[in-house]
């Protein structure tokens, strides 16, 4: 039973297209994230939502638009895809509890723009 | 500003040898500390975490890590490496005041027979 699931896992698309990646978590967490991992494996936070409200919005092109219909879902829509958008996109979620705060990741979505 | 440093970009060890991956952090207070592992083509899996208490933390797959406040370090260790441990390892810091996590640049581990 996957805790953080994202679809699709692989996505190959042409420049200029618009695509979406969906994410769902069944952990009951209040906070969800999108991270981008580049070819050098560096993880960069893109967005963070807490209870459907945007709380972190790093310097990301406005072609990227997150949407959180409810606290269990955080989707990422990308307009006018560019070659430089090719990366792995990770959805994640976290929650403060008595043991602290831990972030859990989905399996990643490998986006290739050609 | 918070930061996480993993000084070793790539490490190669022989199967059966011991392993230590280094992690240093910069933060004004004691943060939450984590190690994650990413196998090729996979997501990040939590190996272990430190929040408080015993500074030696045990994790999955035989890994352990030790928090040393004086050195601002949280090094990951394993006494005997298996070929399946070949992966990318990430150290991360979480701060108490918000849902923010900072990741190191990762250490790539190669295991040779």
Image (spheres, coloured by chain):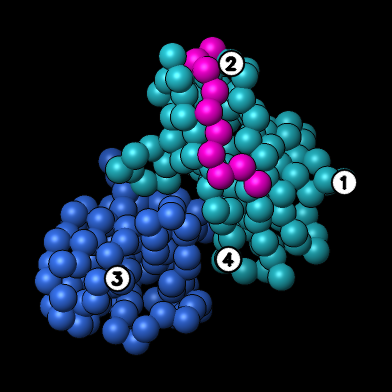
Chain colours: A blue, B cyan
Magenta span covers which residues? B7-16
| Discs 3 and 1 carry the same chain letter | no
Judging depth in this view, the residue of A45 and A101 nearest the camera is A45
Q: Disc 4 to disc 1, how far (Cα)?
A: 23 Å
- Residue receiving disc 2: B17
Residue drawn 77% across and 34% down? Answer: B54
Disc 3 or disc 1, which is closer to the eye? 3
For residue B107, above or below residue A59 = above
Where disc 3 sits, the SS reads helix
The quarter of the picture where residue A1 lies is: top left
Pick whichever of labels 4 and 1 is earlier in the sequence: 1
- Residue receiving disc 1: B70
Q: Disc 2 to disc 3, how far (Cα)?
A: 39 Å
User: Residue reaching furthest right?
Assistant: B70
Q: Disc 3 to disc 4, how far (Cα)?
A: 23 Å
| Discs 4 and 1 carry the same chain letter | yes
| Residue A98: percent from left, percent from top | 63, 50
- Residue receiving disc 3: A85
- Residue receiving disc 4: B100
């Amino acid at each position: 039973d996957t805790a953080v699931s994202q679809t699709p896992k692989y996505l190959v698309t042409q420049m200029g297209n618009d695509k979406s990646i969906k994410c769902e978590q069944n952990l009951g967490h209040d906070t969800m994230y999108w991270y981008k991992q580049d070819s050098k494996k560096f993880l960069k936070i893109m967005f963070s939502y807490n209870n459907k409200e945007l709380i972190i919005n790093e310097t990301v092109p406005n072609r990227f638009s997150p949407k959180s219909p409810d606290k269990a879902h955080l989707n990422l829509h990308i307009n006018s895809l560019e070659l430089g958008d090719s990366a792995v996109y990770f959805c994640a979620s976290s929650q403060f509890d008595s043991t602290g705060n831990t972030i859990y990741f989905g399996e990643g979505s490998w986006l290739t723009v050609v | 500003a918070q930061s996480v440093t993993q000084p070793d970009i790539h490490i190669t060890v022989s199967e059966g040898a011991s392993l230590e991956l280094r992690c240093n952090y910069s933060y004004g207070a004691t943060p939450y500390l984590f190690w994650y592992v990413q196998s090729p083509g996979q997501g990040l899996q939590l190996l272990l975490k430190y929040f408080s208490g015993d500074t030696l933390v045990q994790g999955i797959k035989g890994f352990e890590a030790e928090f040393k406040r004086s050195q601002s370090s949280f090094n990951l260790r394993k006494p005997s490496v298996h070929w399946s441990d070949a992966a990318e390892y990430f150290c991360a810091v979480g701060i108490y005041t918000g849902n923010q996590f900072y990741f190191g640049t990762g250490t790539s581990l190669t295991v040779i027979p």
